[in-house]
Image: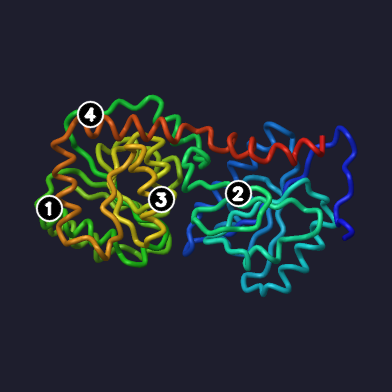
Amino acid sequence: MRTLLNTAMNGSSPTVLLRVDGGAEMGMGHVMESLALAAELRRQYGADVHFVMRDLPEGVAAVRDAGWKLTRLPRECDKCDEAMAWRRLVCEQQPAIAVANLQEPTDELLDSLRLPGLPLACVVNTDAALAVDCRIDVTAHPELMPVDPAFTELGATRQLRETVERLFISFGGSDPFDLTGRVVGELLDDACALEIDVILGPAYGDGSALHERCVAANIIVRLHQNIPLQQVARCMAKADIAITAGGDMMYELAAVGAPSISLCPLPRHAAVAEVFVRHDAVISLGVAREVQAGAVAGAVRSLVADWPQRQLLSAAGRALIDGRGAARQVALLEPWLLKRL
C-alpha cells in the first residue's frame, strides 16, 4: 500500500500532529496535557507541533493563546468529514507521528486518524485495547502524566502543617452529579470548623445556592470560579487536606503534595484512584453512588487526626507526580521522532 508520508530530509525537525478536544463542559484536562507535551517536544526536538481540535471555544483559545499552530474542525463534525480533513492535513504536514488525547478513546473513534505510513500514538486513561503504534497509559503509569510547572514548583517547596486548618474541594469542570454540593453539605452537617476553598468548574453554574448554604452555616467557605491556573495551584498548596474526583486534578494535587481523599463520579475515575492508592498517594472512597452518606466527613475527621498518614500521602504524591511526565511521554515517542532527524 502506498504511504502518504515521504521520507524527511536529514537534519529537519519532526512535525507532530496532536488531536485533542477540550472545553467548559467536557473539561480542559486533555488540552493542558497536550500543551505540556507540545512544549516538551519543541524543547527536546525542535518539533513543529500542530494541534487539530473541534471548535470548542475554551480549548481552542488555550492553544491559540499559547502560540501553537491549530486546525479547527467543526464543533459537530461527522466521522467522514473528520477523516477527510485529517487526510488533507497529513498530506500537507508530513508528520513523523500523530498523538491522540481524547476522552475515552476507542478503535472506532481512532479510525478516522489511521492512515498508511502514519504512526499513531494514543494517550489513554482506560484499559481498553487499542490498535495503536504507541500506547501512553497515564492510568496504569501516573508518572507519565504531564502537569503544569505551577503545581510541581509549589510542591517542591511545600511545608505540610501538622495542624489542619484548610480544606480544598473541587470536582472538575461540570460536576454533573453535584458532588461538590454533597461534600460541602456533609461537612456543614458535621459542624466542620475548618476553612474551605471550593473550586467550581466553568460549567458548574453560578454556585449561588451553595454560597447561601455556606453563609447560613457561619463558617469560612471561599467559592472560586473561572480563576487562573496559578491561583488554583496556590489554593491547592495552602490546603492541609483536599477532596476531589479521580480525574486530572488528582494528579495536580499529588504534585503539590496535598493529602487527598477521592470521591469518584464514575468507575473509570475510581480505577485511576486505585492506582494512586497502590502508591500510597490518595485515600479513595470509591464511586460516589456506592458511598454511604457521611463517609466523606468521616474520612476527613480521620485524616485530620492522622498526621503520619498525611505526611505519607503528601510525600508519595510528590514522588509519583514529579513534573517529568511530558519528558517520559516524549521518550516513548522517540523511536519515531528520531527517524525524522
Circles 1 and 3: CB atoms closer than 8 Å: no
Closer to the chain start, of discs 1 and 3, is 1
Circles 4 and 3: CB atoms closer than 8 Å: no
Q: Which residue is mark 3?
A: 272
Residue type at the position of mark 3: Val
Residue 52 drawn at (x, y percent): 68, 57
Q: Which residue is mark 1?
A: 218
Give the color scheme: rainbow, by chain, secondary structure or one colour.
Answer: rainbow
Callout in the foreground (1, 3): 3
Residue type at the position of mark 4: Arg
Circles 4 and 2: CB atoms closer than 8 Å: no
Closer to the chain start, of discs 3 and 2, is 2
Which class describes the residues within 10 Å of circle 4: few (<14), some (14-19), or many (20+)? few
Q: Which residue is mark 2?
A: 135
Question: Label 2's element?
Answer: strand
Residue type at the position of mark 1: Asn
Residue 20 drawn at (x, y percent): 61, 56
Residue 217 drawn at (x, y percent): 12, 56
| Image mark for residue 161 | 4
Rounded to the nearest angstrom, the CA distance separating label 4 from label 3 is: 27 Å
Quadrant hosting residue 339: top right
Callout in the foreground (2, 1): 2
